Image (cartoon, rainbow, N blue to C red):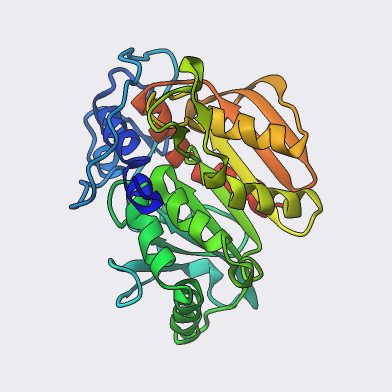
Amino acid sequence: MTRATTLGRLGAGVVAIAALACHAPGPRVVPGVAPATGSAPAQAAVTAPVAAPAPAAQNPSPMQEHTRRHERLAQRDDDGVRVDITGVLPKAVELFIPRRVLGAPTADLDIHFMGATWVPRRAVAAMDRPVIVAATYLGAGSGVYARPFAADTLLYATLLDSIRARVAAVSGAPRIGRVFLSGWSAGYGAIREILRRPADVARVDGVLLIDGIHTSYLPEGKPVADGGAIDSAGLAPFAAFARLAMQGKKRFVITHSEIFPGTFASTTECTDWLLGALGLRRVPVLEWGPMGMQQLSESKSGRFEVLGFAGNTAPDHVDQFHGIGAFLERLLAP
């Protein structure tokens, strides 16, 4: 099987499992936060997948989790300028400039891949710092995110230039300063392809991977516990970027749950491999995270961080997406 075919399947199944989070019973409702159960915003957090390569078969845990709160952002129209950028990626990129950012001299830009675009929009709207977001949902599976950037070596430059031009056309809009990439779940596919090219890396100030970093087993489908191995080639671009972050030249934050797909490497296995390759170790912690998440571990060197959280169910996966605001704050902090 080719790398492109494999990438088309990795992550798609995890996204399918995540849809079950919309029906997880009993989350606590807190002010300004919508419950995960039976609510339209929660259901919209994972948009219905479009035609894509069949997701890899998985052997996920069948357990249900009723202890953590699984809070959800409340969907609403935030005050600001929204513009759809079309003709660059297979689907539209939604650009959002918060109203309070208009008039600022500069603003950070976050280009986000995967999930309902209102979630990162809500996150930046609530931030005190000036941040603009350009978000897109291309479908299920890392391949739908990887393929466009693998096929066109100039696509990232074209996308970034298009965003800059549309921002510049908005009256009172700030100049774009730092540029960050974020991806939830299968969205890592686009980011990995971008990080393969030094010219593109030079135009990326930082990366946030939210419960989304995967690679194949070797041989394919054979877990490490059964004698398989991690396909490190799929993680090499992330390792190279992490080294730059450790040197303070870039910023890189990875968050992950304990979900184990069974037929391709989990986020825990991939971050374990990454930390080992970089000579880093995890430190156990017991802390509350966003959306009622429970943090269990962390590792930090320079501007590179890995945050491990409890949970191997679909709601735990969606928790991470709705926690994007806190994770972006961590990435952007001085």
Q: Residue 22: which quarter of the image? A: top left
* Residue plotted at (74% across, 55% down): 244
Q: Nearer the viewer, residue 214 or 102?
A: 214
With 299 as the anchor, is 209 left or right in this view?
A: left
**Relative to 331, is 55 above or below?**
above
**Relative to 119, is 218 above or below?**
above
Q: Nearer the viewer, residue 217 or 141?
A: 217
With 302 as the anchor, is 192 left or right in this view?
A: left
**Relative to 283, is 11 above or below?**
below
At which x and y percent is residue 235?
A: 57, 44
- If the image is split into quadrants, where does the N terminus sit? top left
At which x and y percent is residue 117?
A: 35, 55
Q: Nearer the viewer, residue 291 or 218?
A: 218
* Residue plotted at (26% across, 44% down): 44
With 178 as the anchor, is 311 left or right in this view?
A: left
At which x and y percent is residue 116?
A: 32, 50
* Residue plotted at (69% across, 40% down): 305
Q: Residue 135: which quarter of the image? A: bottom left
- If the image is split into quadrants, where does the C terminus sit? bottom right
Q: Residue 248: which quarter of the image? A: bottom right
At which x and y percent is residue 170?
A: 45, 83
Tell how many labels.
0
Can residue 117 be seen at all in this image of the molecule?
Answer: no
Can residue 22 be seen at all in this image of the molecule?
Answer: yes
* Residue plotted at (56% across, 54% down): 127
* Residue sitting farthest toward the left: 51
